[in-house]
Image: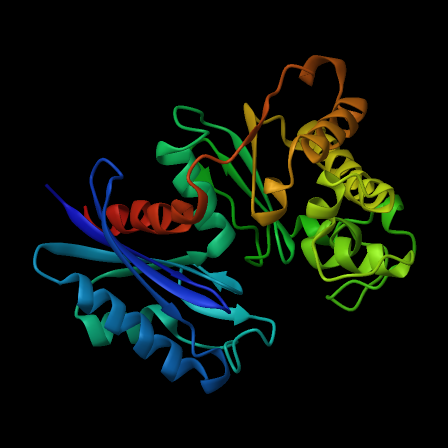
Amino acid sequence: MTLVVGVDIGGTKTSAGLVDAHGTLQAARTRATPASAGPAAVIAAAVELVRELGLGGVAAVGVGSAGVIDAERGLVVSATDAIAGWAGTDLRGELSRQLGLPVAVVNDVHAHALGEHWIGAAAGRRDVLLVAVGTGVGASLVLGGTVRHGAHWTAGHAGHLPSPFARDLPCPCGGRGHLEAIASGPALLAEYRRRGGTGAARPAELAEGGDRLAIAVLTEGAAALGSAIGGLVNLVDPEIVVVGGGVANSGALWWQAMRQAAAAEVLPALRAVPIEPAALGSEAALVGAARLAMEVAS
């Protein structure tokens, strides 16, 4: 049976997993990403993790990485400062040289989508919209079974859609009034404090305890996301929407507000499109990256 390794490189941690042809994760390793040390150190950490899993019988390596990724050339086109100097890194070239294996590289949110599409919440569907809500807000389209990267490799930046809920709030991209400025995890906490809330707990936790301000902030962020999802459903007509990321674990109140806002936006013909939670959790990107590796191994 074909074995491949999936690698998930983020600004905080890097993981590698040995995956078989059925999408089963056989073994996994994780360590902190040496993000401040630069690309060479990050690649070295990924290589060590792959080697810890063992290279015997491994046919290829797939990588889901933070940043805008040119999947054809395996290059990091652009990136935030979450990993120092990450933009311009020849990720595929360096990993292939050091591991002696074929390597495929994709953006980490696209890797999540590939994982959910292969064996997760969207298994068996051809056209899928995945939305990931955590530190930021990202999305991925799998249409006809294939991830759509866009002409400039930036498809999926749903967090930078304009949102009336975000008013004139500053967005991490430098713009204002974007979805990420009101719906992401850091944005929810910032909005709670902006309205006079105190404490370090997440608004979702405070809302569970009955904090009215936290409830208001949480449901507004969820509604902002749902409204954007409804618009995206109208645009791309997916079979299913899968929502993941840390903020998606905010509980029933968040899900109810998000789904209600999405339902208010979708066209009548699309009201039956399901919006479901991601199924694979933190393993999604590993599995999706492994799915990509299966393609270059065959």
Q: Nearer the viewer, residue 104 or 170?
A: 170
In this rendered view, identify the residue nearer to me: 221 or 124: 221
Q: Name the residue rendered at 13%, 63% in the picture.
A: 54
Instruction: From the viewer's perspective, tell me whether residue 11 is left or right of residue 21.
Output: right
Tell me residue 159's x, y (percent): 70, 52
Q: Which of the colour schemes (rainbow, by chain, secondary structure, one colour) is used?
A: rainbow
130 on left or right of 173: left
In which quarter of the view is residue 284 placed? top left
**Depth order, front residue of 107/37:** 37
Residue 152 position within the rendered picture, expressed as x and y whole percent measured from the top left: 58, 59
At horizontal 76% and vertical 53% (from top left) the residue drawn is: 188
- In the image, residue 42 lies at what x, y percent? 39, 77
Note whether 29 is above or below 113 in the view shown. below
Q: How many marks?
A: 0
Q: Residue at x 91, y 56 (%)?
A: 195
Asked if 258 appears above or below 63 in the picture, the reply is above
* Residue extending farthest front: 209
Q: Quadrant of the N terminus?
A: top left
Viewer-side residue, 204 vs 38: 204
